[in-house]
Image (cartoon, helix red, strand yellow):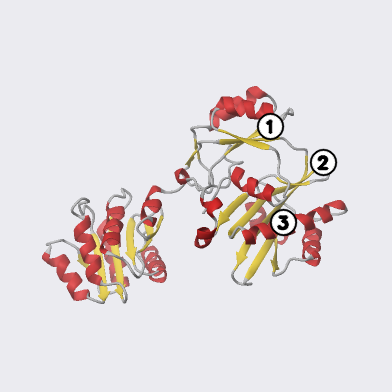
Amino acid sequence: MNIHEYQAKEILKSFGVTVPKGQLALTENEAVEAAKNLGGDIWVVKAQIHAGGRGKAGGVRVCKSLDEVKAAAHDLLGSLLITKQTGQAGKDVGKVYIEEGLDIAREFYLSLLVDREEECVSFVVSPAGGMDIEEVAASQPEKITTFPIRDINACDTAKMAAFLGLSGDAVTQFDTLARQLYRMFVEQDAAMLELNPLVLTGGGDLVALDAKFVADDNALYRQEAMVAMRDLSEEDSREIEAAQFGLNYIQLDGNIGCMVNGAGLAMATMDMIHMKGEEPANFLDVGGGVTVLAVTEAFKLLFSDQHVKAVLVNIFGGIVRCDIIAQGLLEAIKTHPMNVPVVMRLVGTNEEAGQKLVKDAGLKVYWANDLDEAASIAVKVIK
């Protein structure tokens, strides 16, 4: 689960991390009042969306007067911000964060993530942080290094500080910062924490100028305060609806809708569609203990998606019964007509009963015996 930058910084502050003074604003006037409250003569107006790349997309504005703050807020609020991460769909800007301007001497990149290969938390650091970090990773990978951390200590933090080129008091500050971030990452059940940039000010202070925090969905049951920060307006409405029925659904950019049981089989199905020359419109894993109601809702999601030109149902029934999938289809078409071709591969438990239900209903579906055949038919029927 993602949260906004301003929310991530509230958590950082609670763990002792230094962040710029800032205030949230929902209107132009609130933005101006926020700037007045913060004081100073330079402010930064930041669009609050769940996506990176805001700076290059014009979502971060440096302002040197209150009039500029008002103009920036006017431009951003209610706008559609398109960044490298949002794609052409963009994100609607409903709030902005007003921050004090800082005297920045150097910018660094620092993130923490769950390193599955090392089976620990790893720090990823670079002395070349900022908006061009992706280009740095591509053209100068030697400037980015990963430090696996199992029990953070002074030796670990000293190595990272040396790689960043820090010296003097900044090394001591970094030791404190790294320990604070590690404790926050663990205690808040994070999946990823990113500071880009982490800055060294002209006064010699290390400050988290930007912050991105992603919580582990599987641990949200013990993070009530984090759940309260969830902004549903930033999430796909279909994904929210699917989650209510226990469906694992992620919207994608293709045109072949997929319904599969099991994440591995779902990935294989998506790969096969790609190999046949088309792209999946979604990832949809109905899971093992699926009900007729959940399958019904899954079909409704697929049939109501205007990007879907064909639906590929790939069920290898073990725990899942094929007749439940068929019953879900029959229930769904009562309200959501089958206006696109449907390709079905129902193999396993109760497969004959499932196929009979569909055939007796007089539905025109394309039957396949295996995944390769199913993907081939799905690609063919949309062409």
Q: How far across and how far down the image is residue 308, in percent?
A: 31, 53
Q: What's the amino acid at mark 1?
A: Trp
Residue 214, by quadrant, is: bottom right
The residue where tag 3 is placed is: 180
Point out which mark residue 43 bears: 1
Q: Residue at x 22, y 51 (%)?
A: 336
Secondary structure of residue under mark 1: strand
Q: What's the amino acid at mark 2?
A: Gly
Residue 6, by quadrant, is: top right
Residue toward you, 56 or 46: 46
Instruction: Give the spatial CA distance, label 1 vs label 2.
Output: 17 Å
Q: How packed is label 2: few (under 14 Cα within 10 Å), some, or many (20 or more)? A: few
Point out which mark residue 296 bears: none
Instruction: Give the spatial CA distance, label 3 vs label 2.
Output: 23 Å
The residue where tag 2 is placed is: 202
CB atoms of marks 3 and 2 within 8 Å: no
Query: Considering the image in quadrants, where does the C terminus appear?
Result: bottom left
Q: Which of marks 1 and 2 is nearer the N terminus?
A: 1
Task: For marks 3 and 2, give the one nearer the viewer.
Answer: 3
Q: What's the amino acid at mark 3?
A: Gln
Q: How far across and how far down the image is residue 99, in percent?
A: 67, 36
Q: How far across and how far down the image is residue 212, in percent?
A: 61, 50
Instruction: Give the spatial CA distance, label 1 vs label 3.
Output: 27 Å
